[in-house]
Image (tube, grey):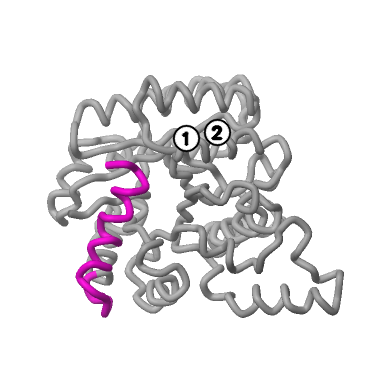
Amino acid sequence: MIIDVFCHIYPRDFLNALARLKSPLPHVNFAAEIKGGWEDFVDADLRLSHMDRYGVDIQILSLATPAFESANPREQIELARIANEGIAEIVARYPGRFLGVATLPMLTIEKALEELDYAVDKLGLKGVQIFSNIGGKPLDSAELIPFYEKVAARGLPLLLHPTWWNYYDWIMEYGMWNIFGWPFDTSLAMGRIVFGGILERFPGLKVITHHLGAMTPYFVERIRGFHDQGQQYPNLSTRARITKAPLDYFKLFYGDTAVYGWKPAMLCGMAFFGADHVTFATDYPFGPEAGERYISNTIRSVRELEISVEEREAIFSGNAKWLFKI
């Protein structure tokens, strides 16, 4: 069995709602392009044909980015409800082939918690997607503590996805905001969750990081070294809100296989997370050939890994079954 835990969709009603909004959201033009022809983002039957072609049994659907933190709070509440109901409708229409996770209006934490309960209890969604910053605020912001508390208490997987960032005025050139910027923002988000004490306080949080933990597996010794230097140089200290070594917390994250089939990256992520903390994902339908290249490449790379049958099964489906209670 193959379960794709991190793949994306736009419910049609969500795109229609974006078109009605008057505020200048940065992703409205992107959504308009999709409405004009990117049917793999909205057409569930086309999606199923690709799944069947490559032997993917279940997709866990999350709203495609960009996130809508730039909307005003009222619009964000409306958009979250429409997106979640749209995903739940697709799941209900194709039983056994799709599961869904919720996107929440995180600018208003009280409404986010209400939407979480509605999405899980009424719509039957199986987890929550959160983005790497909340309208520019870090993920260890104090107002997010009730959110983490509820997610941890309910045992829900938390999917961490990168989003827009704006560190330089030249980031949009050459696609660098996406190629390099999104993995960087994911790494920052993981760091804030670790160093900000979120996993210290809620060690049972099940956070699945997109793109196999981004920069973290590659910079293991850099993380370790800065922590150790902090004993001599207080300005480098990473100890502010944690009582153990940072890597003890980073290893609590899960990574997905959405590195598009690049086997050396997959080996690096496997070496860091271990097979019991890696889940299969393709980032479908992003990528060349309407996402099919990444499906094919990722499945092939996982099958080529020199690991046991049990470890391969855990990556393809076993870890996802446990995380999402399938």
Q: Is residue 55 left or right of residue 202?
A: left
Question: Which residue: 69% across, 44% down?
Answer: 136
Q: Quadrant of the N terminus?
A: bottom left
Question: Which residue: 27% across, 42% down?
Answer: 326
Q: Are marks 1 and 2 in contact (CB under 8 Å)?
A: yes
Camera-nearest residue between 12 and 160: 160
Badge 1 local density, few (<14 within 10 Å), some, or many (20+)?
few
Camera-nearest residue between 266 and 295: 266
Q: Which image quadrant for residue 275?
A: bottom left
What whole-number distance in Å separates the C-alpha atoms at marks 1 and 2?
A: 6 Å
Q: Secondary structure at mark 1?
A: helix
Three-letter amino acid code of the residue under disc 1: Arg
Residue 76 shows up from this direction: no
Q: Where residue 207 appears, x then y in whole percent?
A: 49, 50
In this rendering, the count of numbered labels is 2
Q: Where residue 28 appears, x then y in whole percent?
A: 51, 34
Tell whether position 180 is magenta. Answer: no
Q: Which residues are magenta?
A: 303-326
Residue denoted by label 2: 150
Residue denoted by label 1: 154
Q: Where residue 39 appears, x then y in whole percent?
A: 28, 39
Q: Where residue 181 appears, x then y in whole percent?
A: 59, 60
